[in-house]
Image (cartoon, rainbow, N blue to C red):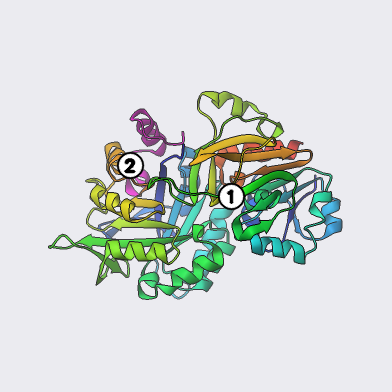
């Protein structure tokens, strides 16, 4: 039976792991590769590294980071952050990344999904989507690290991303991110109905029960979290043991 | 010990190379027949599309060469599928080491997502690749490996590990000096390292 995946996410700024609340208020949380190795040893199923540094040197530093991770890690990992061209994807895969996330660039240029999935295979193209619920209960896609609202509907965009060749959807609910009040389960459940590719849930993890809910009610294939792992609130082995005891099929 | 990773422009070579480095092995990456012939062991990785991968093999004149190898050969993922008789991906003829066909996963309900991606349990383990305490100890909880694939090899007489996703299929194959894994041992944490160590011990 296929296991539900637990994915620690490492946001990286200037080479350091950072964590914010609702996309703001950054706190430092250590060296990304060391943290990644620790999580791999503890039983994380996959890791996601997102570079949120905004400099023109970025492509080079991200490539070097991917290479360092690939050398040291014995589990799959995804890299992203500002990926905007076929060349960006190529450089990261070449450095040893298993998958690459594309976020804003795919919204602005949806053809990029076709171009990259045809060339590298759809299994390595993860479309990351940040969205927030508005006053009329519509989920709107945001770009630029959550700064710009283009008024695009989350569900329509997810469906289009799949049709264009995305291999996975990583949806972060900006309304839940950093709150530790639980995942947006109803949204994941709806995404699961719309999409036939795996859905990674992100934003809102605070307790083991939140993971149980997003797997059972949200039908998510994987759940991603950051601060509960970085600050030792729920270590990966304890989370997995508790999930297993609650009947969720995980790798332990 | 000389380990050679076959370089044919269709491999996850870097990941396999790094995994071997973590086990203290500096592998040679090559498509040169003399170098391959002199290897103690050979790893045949692969990602991407079967048809184009087979074309790369033909261009390098390796399609007729690989079946003549006498030392242990480990095919991984697409490498395993190319060692089979035929694959539905691009209606491609394989190298025919394993007398089995590779078919496309057909979802039967909305829970069946394709590609099959993630950690899955393996059963009916046998043969040298799985011959170690780690795999014995966890009999109550079968070992899990990391899979990413859209096509699968059917169960056959060479199956040495099975996996169930939509239907039971071959997670690993073994025949004479040829070994193969559908999953990625280089990305499968401790279980994957154990399998690679077992291959290196052959």
Residue sitting at 70 percent across and 60 percent down?
B54
Q: Is residue A43 left or right of residue B29?
A: left
Question: In front here: B11 or B26?
Answer: B11
The number of numbered badges drawn on the structure is: 2
Question: In front here: A135 or A208?
Answer: A135
What's the distance in space between the residues labelled 1 and 2, CA to CA? Answer: 29 Å
Residue sitting at 50 percent across and 46 percent down?
A37
| Callout 1: chain | B
Checking the image for residue A215, the label placed there is: 2
Q: Is residue A214 above or below residue A101?
A: above
Is A165 in the magenta?
no
Q: Residues within 10 Å of mark 1 (few under 14, many from 20)?
A: some
| Callout 2: chain | A
Residue A248's x, y, as percent? 37, 34
Q: Residues within 10 Å of mark 2 (few under 14, many from 20)?
A: many
Checking the image for residue A131, the label placed there is: none
Is A251 in the magenta?
yes
Residue ID for mark 1: B103
Residue A137's x, y, as percent? 16, 59
Q: Are marks 1 and 2 on the same chain?
A: no
Would you say residue A52 is visible in this rendering? no
Say which quarter of the image contains residue A241: top left
Classify mark 2: helix, strand or loop.
helix
Mark in front: 1 vs 2: 1
Classify mark 1: helix, strand or loop.
strand
Would you say residue A28 is visible in this rendering? yes
Span of residues in magenta: A226-252
Residue A95's x, y, as percent? 58, 62
Residue B12's x, y, as percent? 62, 56
Residue sitting at 44 percent across and 39 percent down?
A3
């Amino acid at each position: 039976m296929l296991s539900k995946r637990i994915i620690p996410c490492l946001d990286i700024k200037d080479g350091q792991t950072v964590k914010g609340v609702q996309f703001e208020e950054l706190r430092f949380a250590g060296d990304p590769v060391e943290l990644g190795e620790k999580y791999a040893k503890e039983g994380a199923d996959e890791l996601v590294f997102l570079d949120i540094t905004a400099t023109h040197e970025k492509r080079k530093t991200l490539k070097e980071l991917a290479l360092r991770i690939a050398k040291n890690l014995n589990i799959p990992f995804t890299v992203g952050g500002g990926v905007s061209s076929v060349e960006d994807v190529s450089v990261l895969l070449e450095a040893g990344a298993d998958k690459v996330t594309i976020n804003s660039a795919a919204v602005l240029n949806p053809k990029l999904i076709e171009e990259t999935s045809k060339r590298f295979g759809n299994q390595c193209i993860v479309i990351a989507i940040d969205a927030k619920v508005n006053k009329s209960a519509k989920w709107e896609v945001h770009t630029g690290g959550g700064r710009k609202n283009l008024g695009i509907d989350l569900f329509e965009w997810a469906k289009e991303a799949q049709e264009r060749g995305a291999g996975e959807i990583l949806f972060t609910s900006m309304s839940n991110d950093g709150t530790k009040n639980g995942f947006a389960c109803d949204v994941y459940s709806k995404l699961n109905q719309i999409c036939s590719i795996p859905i990674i849930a992100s934003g809102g993890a605070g307790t083991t029960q939140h993971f149980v809910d997003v797997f059972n009610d949200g039908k998510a294939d994987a759940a991603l979290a950051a601060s509960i792992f970085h600050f030792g609130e729920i270590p990966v082995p304890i989370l997995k043991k508790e999930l297993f005891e609650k009947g969720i099929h995980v790798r332990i | 010990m000389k380990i050679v990773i076959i370089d044919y422009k269709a491999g996850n070579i870097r990941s396999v190379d790094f995994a071997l480095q973590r086990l203290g092995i500096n592998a040679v990456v090559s498509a040169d027949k003399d170098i391959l012939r002199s290897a103690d062991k050979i790893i045949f990785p692969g990602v991407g599309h079967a048809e184009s991968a087979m074309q790369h093999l033909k261009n390098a004149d390796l399609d007729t060469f690989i079946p003549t190898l006498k030392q242990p050969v480990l095919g991984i993922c697409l490498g395993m599928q190319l060692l089979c008789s035929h694959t539905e991906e691009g209606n491609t003829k394989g190298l025919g080491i394993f007398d089995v066909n590779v078919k496309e996963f057909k979802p039967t309900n909305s829970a069946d997502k394709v590609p099959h991606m993630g950690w899955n349990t393996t059963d009916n383990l046998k043969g040298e690749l799985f011959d170690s305490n780690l795999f014995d100890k966890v009999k109550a909880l079968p070992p899990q490996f990391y899979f990413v694939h859209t096509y699968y090899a059917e169960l056959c007489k060479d199956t040495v590990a099975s996996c169930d996703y939509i239907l039971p299929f071959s997670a690993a194959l073994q025949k004479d000096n040829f070994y193969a894994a559908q999953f990625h041992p280089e990305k499968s944490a401790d279980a994957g390292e154990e399998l690679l160590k077992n291959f290196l011990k052959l």
